[in-house]
Each structure stands twice: as C-alpha cells, then as structure tokens.
C-alpha cells in the first residue's frame, strides 16, 4: 500500500491556446480539469497500476469538493482533512507549439489545528503502508521544517518515506534521512547551489544530497532520463520519446513507477523511466496505465555517462 501526502493539493485547469500574447484576450481551443498536486498524481498513477493507495489531502471550499469528487470518480481513496480555506486552482496554458506555462497558486493557509489534524491523519493511514510519498509545495502556515517533522514521525512508526519537494522544505528534511528524494534538475541544482551541465554534474549533486542525509536520490533530468544514486551505487536510464504531448506530472508518474517496482535499485529506476516516458506521451496530467508503458524502450546504462551534456542544462 502506498500512502501519499499532498499538503497543498490543487484543481488543475489546463487551457489549450494557439499562442500566448501578453495583454490580449486569448480564446482557448480546449480545456480540461484534473485533480492535482504531486502526491495526488502519484496516487493516480499507483491506482492506474492496480495497486492500493490512499491520498491524504487537506481539502476546502468548492474546488476542494471538486477534487474529492474527481478522485472518487477515478476510484482513488482519499483521507480528507477538512480545512476552512479553499483549495487552490492551478492554471496551465498549453500552446500549440508544445510550450506549457503554469501558474501555481499559493493555496489556503492551514491553521495550527488543521496542521495537527493533517499529521494525525497521516499517522492513522500509515499503519500498513509500504511507502509514504510526501509531495509538493507547502501551503502557508506550515513551516519549512514540516516535512522534516513528518519524516521523523513516519520513521518512528517504521514506515519508509519518499519525498518530492524543493527549496528549504527539501533541505531541512534531509537531516531526518528520508529513504528516497526525487528532485528534478532545477530542484537538484537549487539544492546544491550549482549549475548542472552534464550528467556527471547531476551525479555529484545527487551524491551531495546523500551526504546530507538522503538514503537514495532519484534525480529526474527531463528528456535526458533519470539517475539513481544509493548506498549500493549509481545507475542511469533513459527512454526515447518521439512525440511529447504534456510533461505535467511526468515526475509524479516516475516516482509512482519507482515505488510500485519496490523503490530501490536499477529495476525500480527502469520502471520510473518507463512511467515518465509514458506520461509525457499522454495529454494533461493523465497518468499511465500498464498498457501505456513501453518497458522495452528503456535503456539502463551499464555505467553512468558522466560526460553526457544535458539537453536542458540548469544555469
Ligand atoms: N521530453 C521528454 N522526453 C522523454 N522523457 C521525458 C521528457 N520529459 C520528461 N520525461 C520523462 O519524465 C521524467 C520526469 O520528468 P521531469 O521533467 O524530470 O520531472 P518533473 O515533472 O518532476 O519536473 C523524466 O526523467 C523522463 O523519464
Ligand atoms: O505543489 P507545487 O510545487 O505547487 O506543484 C503542484 C502542481 O504540480 C503538479 O503535481 C504537476 O507536477 P509538475 O509541475 O512537476 O509536472 C500539478 O498537478 C500541480 O498543479
């Protein structure tokens, strides 16, 4: 069973637009609404794989009710923490040439009582969890050390933690030794305060996060693939995708793929890459089912290609 925790979930609205012109009225040619937030997407991908998952979510107002309704329609179990503020709506503008612009709202502020109820709900749900995946930004009211506290509590209860967040929330959680962290290239560069130009730069940065406390680092490098660094070694895998439809939630699908396949070693890395590659072939934040995966297209390198230049370097 995989429990996901999304402290700041969202209603994701995607508008398809011909192109973005500042100051103009832009007529959308299509729109879709999805339940969103990084842990929500992980739960959607885990459920799509036919595995049990519970999504712990603070939900409030009409957007919160809609998120719950949409997840219910997808058969995803939600442990709901009622909050007074309204759940945020995040907007994605998808241009015809494939460029995606996202506006992520700050979300409601959680009161001390709501924060306590959130932690208590995670505790209640964690009894038979193989993994607790803690994902996304923190809403106002939660301090940057909130994930650190959650990791400490989960470890005390004997659960394994996968953490996908960024900035101070990621850095402060490292001291509690999360079992896996999943930064993307920008988050990894920010965490170490250096630019990333090659796979070797990403490898050094991932090793630094391990030195600071992460058990394993699953670094997703967009079109370049993924790197896994743990106590046993380092592996690199990638998969070619000819037509990218939407990269929204590709990292979330990858983390789900990694955890579904056991959450360690090269087999889990290959599953992460297969899920990420399948997610980008699908529209919006649609999560792949097993039928969407093309595991044969994934290559796990025998050696990490440290000299390989990143197609999207972080500077
Ligand atoms: N353009 C792409 N071509 C092929 N695979 C991709 C592409 N973009 C993303 N992916 C796959 O999805 C994974 C996650 O994407 P990434 O952008 O790194 O994460 P995030 O969504 O967290 O920012 C990548 O590691 C890769 O496996
Ligand atoms: O918590 P954050 O960092 O604001 O991100 C929330 C957004 O991330 C998503 O989970 C998608 O992830 P990506 O933007 O990494 O593709 C959306 O569903 C959601 O709108």
Image (tube, grey):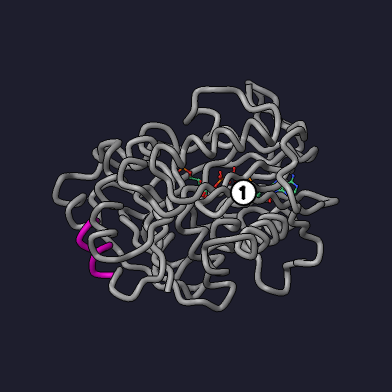
Q: Which residues are magenta?
A: 119-125
* Residue 306 percent across, percent down from the top left: 72, 36
Q: Is residue 160 visible?
A: yes
Number of numbered discs on residues: 1
Q: Secondary structure at mark 1?
A: strand
| Image height of 34 relative to 262, above or below | above
Which residue position holds label 1? Answer: 234
| Image height of 260 relative to 135, above or below | below
> Magenta-highlighted stretch: main secondary structure?
helix
The residue drawn where x is 65% and y is 71% is: 289
Q: Is residue 120 magenta?
A: yes
In screen coordinates, is 3 left or right of 267? left
Q: Is residue 37 visible?
A: no
In screen coordinates, is 47 left or right of 3? right
Is the C terminus in the top left, top right, bottom left or bottom right quadrant?
top right
In this rendered view, identify the residue nearer to me: 116 or 312.
312
The residue drawn where x is 49% and y is 28% is: 192
Is the N terminus in the top left, top right, bottom left or bottom right quadrant?
bottom left
Q: Is residue 259 magenta?
A: no
In screen coordinates, is 215 left or right of 295? left
* Residue 233 percent across, percent down from the top left: 58, 51
The residue drawn where x is 38% and y is 35% is: 171
Taking the view exactly as shown, the residue that stands out farthest to the left is 113
* Residue 307 percent across, percent down from the top left: 76, 33
Quadrant assignment, res 25: top right
């Amino acid at each position: 069973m995989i429990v996901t925790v999304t402290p700041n979930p969202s209603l994701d609205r995607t508008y398809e637009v011909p192109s973005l012109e500042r100051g103009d009225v832009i007529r959308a040619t299509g729109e879709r609404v999805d339940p969103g937030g990084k842990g929500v997407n992980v739960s959607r991908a885990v459920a799509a794989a036919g595995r049990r998952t519970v999504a712990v979510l603070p939900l409030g107002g009409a957007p919160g009710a809609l998120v719950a309704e949409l997840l219910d329609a997808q058969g995803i179990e939600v442990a709901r923490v009622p909050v007074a503020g309204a759940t945020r709506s995040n907007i994605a503008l998808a241009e015809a040439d494939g460029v995606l612009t996202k506006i992520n709202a700050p979300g409601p502020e959680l009161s001390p009582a709501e924060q306590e109820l959130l932690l208590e709900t995670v505790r209640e749900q964690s009894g038979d969890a193989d993994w607790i995946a803690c994902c996304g930004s923190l809403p106002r009211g939660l301090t940057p050390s909130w994930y650190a506290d959650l990791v400490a509590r989960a470890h005390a209860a004997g659960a394994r933690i996968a953490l996908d967040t960024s900035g101070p929330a990621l850095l402060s959680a490292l001291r509690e030794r999360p079992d896996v962290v999943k930064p993307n290239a920008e988050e990894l560069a920010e965490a170490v305060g250096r630019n990333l130009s090659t796979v070797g730069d990403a490898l050094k940065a991932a090793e630094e996060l391990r030195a600071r406390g992460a058990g394993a680092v699953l670094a997703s490098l967009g079109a370049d693939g993924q790197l896994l660094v743990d106590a046993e070694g380092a592996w690199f895998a990638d998969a070619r995708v000819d037509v990218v439809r939407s990269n929204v939630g590709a990292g979330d699908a990858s983390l789900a793929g990694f955890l579904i396949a056991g959450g360690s070693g090269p087999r889990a890395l290959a599953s992460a890459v297969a899920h990420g590659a399948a997610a980008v072939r699908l529209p919006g934040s649609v999560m792949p089912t097993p039928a969407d995966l093309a595991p044969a297209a994934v290559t796990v390198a025998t050696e990490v290609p440290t000299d390989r230049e990143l197609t999207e370097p972080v500077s």
